[in-house]
Amino acid sequence: MSATITTVEPPPAPASRSRKLWPRLARPAAAVLSGALLYASFPPRPLWWLVLPGFALLGWVLTARGVRAALGLGLLAGLGFMLPLLHWTGEEVGPVPWLALACAEALFIAVGCVGIAAVSRLPYWPVWAAAVWTLDEAIRARVPFGGFPWGKIAFGQADGAFLPLAALGGTPLLSFAVVLCGFGLLEAARQVRRHRAAGTVPRSAVVAAAVTVAAPVVAALAALPLVDDSPEDGTATVAAIQGNVPRLGLDFNSQRRAVLDNHANRTEQLARDVKAGKVPQPDFVLWPENSSDLDPYRNADARDAIDRAVRAIGAPTVIGAVLTPDTGPLRNTLIQWDPGKGPVETYDKRHIQPFGEYMPMRSVARIFSKDVDRVQRDFGPGGKVGVFDLAGTKVGLVTCYEAAFDDAVRDTVKDGGQLIAVPSNNATFGRSEMTYQQLAMSQVRAVEHGRSVVVPVTSGVSAVIRPDGTVVEKTKMFTPDALVDEVPLRSSLTPATRLGTLPEGVLALLALGGLGWATARAVRARGRRKDGAAGPGEDATAAA
């Protein structure tokens, strides 16, 4: 009797922990990286093109994800984008406001990413997904507290190849085109991979992938003729005054007279330079927002200082002042100051900054930061569009934060503005990237509306921008200076100005259509699965 020897195979070696962990971490890590690429595409870095691989990576992360997964991955992408982008908001008040704002904005992005994941199963998904992102930006620009458009993808494209599209359909179309191209790159890469693996790919899929990449690029090239910096209405010589502040940070508000004196003195120096023939006589002068935090209607010494400076330069001057009426809210006001007549017209800022110029939910906000009590008296919004006639030039007025809002800029142009002025104050944000992000907004607005844009800033980067978005002059940060330049004046309206909110509305409807289609498909799929489970003998492939 022979014995049978059985060979027992050793059990397979357990996979290493790192090999098990990596598949779980790949998408979260890619989500954070996609957000970081979006951030890196914004100024002051000239890396606008990083937005394309950023969205290609985000598309890969979200493809065919469920609601919970898409929400979590979208939140990671949003934090990777917003945390570094908005770091300047905590420059002088600590990390709590910065983290709260960045997390709130990231939540908006996360919800949008749920929609992108849903439409990623549809044919031509890059189109639907780009529209969903644009709809998400539109909502974020309106709610809550009037919205916060900072971080709109269009604002990172001031030096990009897609910028001419701003003149065609404004910032919504520009954002849509950039996002579409990024998602299209992912789809094109997928089709190439499938072609290599299978040897053949449906021609319609290849065409769709190619079109989503090529269409935005072709559209941007086709829109180039809309970008024009010719002086339709002649030119004007404008001066932008940067007086600087005594010290960095919020403490400058306690030195209001010093800030006013800085701007008055720099204007008087400009007058001496004009008299000496060093610079041409300006037709009008622009001071920044908060250049006089002393109300010149209530403080005789502030009025005298402004009056002396304006008479010295001999040109109408726009003064940024804080008005303090006996009752009611404060006013962030731009005053047209005539060298012979004094103050003749005013514009009150319409889009005021929540948690900065007024404090919503003050008692709740105080739980997180006692800095809310720095805002002891709220500002109130103005109710009219600001256009000043300065020595025969119609100047549209957009105060600082308002540059982020499409309607605030568009209204001034539609009301006759031949040039846009963006008086700003960013002294409370130190040497952060805020001033460069805001400058990029003004470059995009210049192309969007075909107007020269002049940006006088208290202490950041003041600049003169041509209607084609080119920065022709700018200052250094925290350096007293005066920019004097001859700028082209224009009165024709770009398609973006004429169309107003229509492009954004069309893209919103496109997004809603895609989301509705995706929802209907999901409902039908669930119904088929239920029918397949309930019906014995039903073809399993049909149930799937």
Image: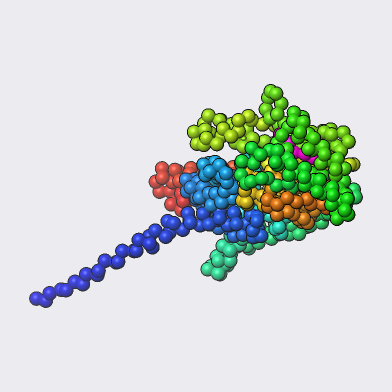
| Corner quadrant of residue 55 | bottom right
Residue 74 lies in the magenta stretch: no
Tell me if residue 319 is in the magenta stretch.
yes
Residue drawn at the location 55% of the way across and 69% of the way down: 196
Please identify the quarter of the rendering in which residue 501 is found. top right
**Where is 211 relative to 308, above or below?**
below
Residue 141 percent coordinates (x, y): 64, 41
User: What sort of colour scheme is used for the picture?
Assistant: rainbow
In the picture as drawn, the residue positioned furthest to the top comes out as 327
**Quadrant showing the N terminus:** bottom left
Q: Could you say which is closer to the camera, residue 472 or residue 164?
A: 472
Judged by its main secondary structure, the magenta piece is strand
Q: Is residue 310 left or right of residue 382?
A: right
Residue 275, image x, y percentages: 88, 50
Residue 158 at x, y percent in the picture: 71, 54
Residue visible at 56% across and 55% down?
36
Residue 350 visible in the snapshot: no
Which of 73 and 106 lies nearest the eye of the viewer?
A: 106
**Residue sitting at x 85%, y 55%:** 278
226 or 473: nearer the eye?
473
Magenta stretch, residue numbers: 318-322
Q: Where in the figure is residue 462, as x and y percent of width and height?
A: 73, 50
Label count reads: 0
Tell me if 93 is positioned left or right of 386 in this view: left
Residue visible at 61% across and 59% down in the picture: 50
User: Taking the image as drawn, is residue 327 in sight?
Assistant: yes
The reply, left or right, for residue 31 in relation to residue 208 is: left
